[in-house]
Image (cartoon, rainbow, N blue to C red):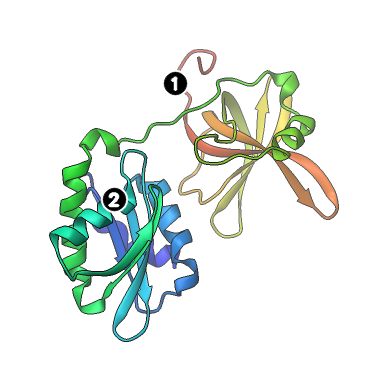
């Protein structure tokens, strides 16, 4: 479903404020996951639809900071009476249903509403981090301590920013990159989920500390949330 959705997203460019996708073969149980991943990748409010009953399609939406998704759907419903059959949710996520025959009309109406509520600057991704992590604190013990905490909206799990040499990389699971990363004379296991390109020899990386459990063993893993080719200097500041 995610691959199908990505193919449908080819029309999403800098000109679009929203992304709405639908496929007759999609399952309702996972459209929320698809919407979330597309939102993270394209930094647009996304609604993914699957077929429901009696000519209806049901959507699951995820939003970006700056757009209250439930309020956006409410405004769309008031501007276009009868278009949205029902909806509910909160700022970051919402669900709704429309008639399948009204899908294209909903896409246009939702896009127009969001354009009135956000600016192009709101669509620019902002990456936040907790700065560099001391090499002596980049440990399995630290990863376990973080895993034992409760994180959520408004209180995100810490992310760190450092420079690494990529000494090995291979594709696993069809679309993920497993890395061997070097920093300050230490080597770490790393992972980039849904990697779309070969990673260069040296990167500035935004990453989380994770505990990788495999065959009864536990090891430190650096999960890369974002990377860019290293650009001069000795590392991130």
Mark 2: secondary structure? helix
Q: Which residue, as the protein is rendered here, is positioned at the far bottom?
A: 54
Front-most of residues 233 and 120:
120
Residue 58 coordinates in the image, percent (x, y) = 36, 72
Compared with residue 26, is residue 225 higher up or lower down, i.e. above or below?
above
Residue at image position (25%, 77%) is 99
Image mark for residue 71: 2
- Mark 2 or mark 1, which is nearer to you? 2
Crowding at label 1, few (<14), some or many (≥20) Cα neighbours within 10 Å? few
Q: Position of residue 143 (x, y in %)?
A: 72, 35
Residue found at x 22% / y 71%? 103
Kindly identify the residue that appears in the image at 21 percent across and 61 percent down: 77
| 30 lies above or below 177 | below
Residue 75, numbered label: none
Where, by quadrant of the figure, is residue 52 drawn?
bottom left
- Describe residue 187's horizontal placement relative to residue 155 as left or right: right
Residue 190 rendering spot, x and y as whole percentages: 65, 39
Place residue 74 in its image quadrant.
bottom left
Circle 1 residue: 231
């Amino acid at each position: 479903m995610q691959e199908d959705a990505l193919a449908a997203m080819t029309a999403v460019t800098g000109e679009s404020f929203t992304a709405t996708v639908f496929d007759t073969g999609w399952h309702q149980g996972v459209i929320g996951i698809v919407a979330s991943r597309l939102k993270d990748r394209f930094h647009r409010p996304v609604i993914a639809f699957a077929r429901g009953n009696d000519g209806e399609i049901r959507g699951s939406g995820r939003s970006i900071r700056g757009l209250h998704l439930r309020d956006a759907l409410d405004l769309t419903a008031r501007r276009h009476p009868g278009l949205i059959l029902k909806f509910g949710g909160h700022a970051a996520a919402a669900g709704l249903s429309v008639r399948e025959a009204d899908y294209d009309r909903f896409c246009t109406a939702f896009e127009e509403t969001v354009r009135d509520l956000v600016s192009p600057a709101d669509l620019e991704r902002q990456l936040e981090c907790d700065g560099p992590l001391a090499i002596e604190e980049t440990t399995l013990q630290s990863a376990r301590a973080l895993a034992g905490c409760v994180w959520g909206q408004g209180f995100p799990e810490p992310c760190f920013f450092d420079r690494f040499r990529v000494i090995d990389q291979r594709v696993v699971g069809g679309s993920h990159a497993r890395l061997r990363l070097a920093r300050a004379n230490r080597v770490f296991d790393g992972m980039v989920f849904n990697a779309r390109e070969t990673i260069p020899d040296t990167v500035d990386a935004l990453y989380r500390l994770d505990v990788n459990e495999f065959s009864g063993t536990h090891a430190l893993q650096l999960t890369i949330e974002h990377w860019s080719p290293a650009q001069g200097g000795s590392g991130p500041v």
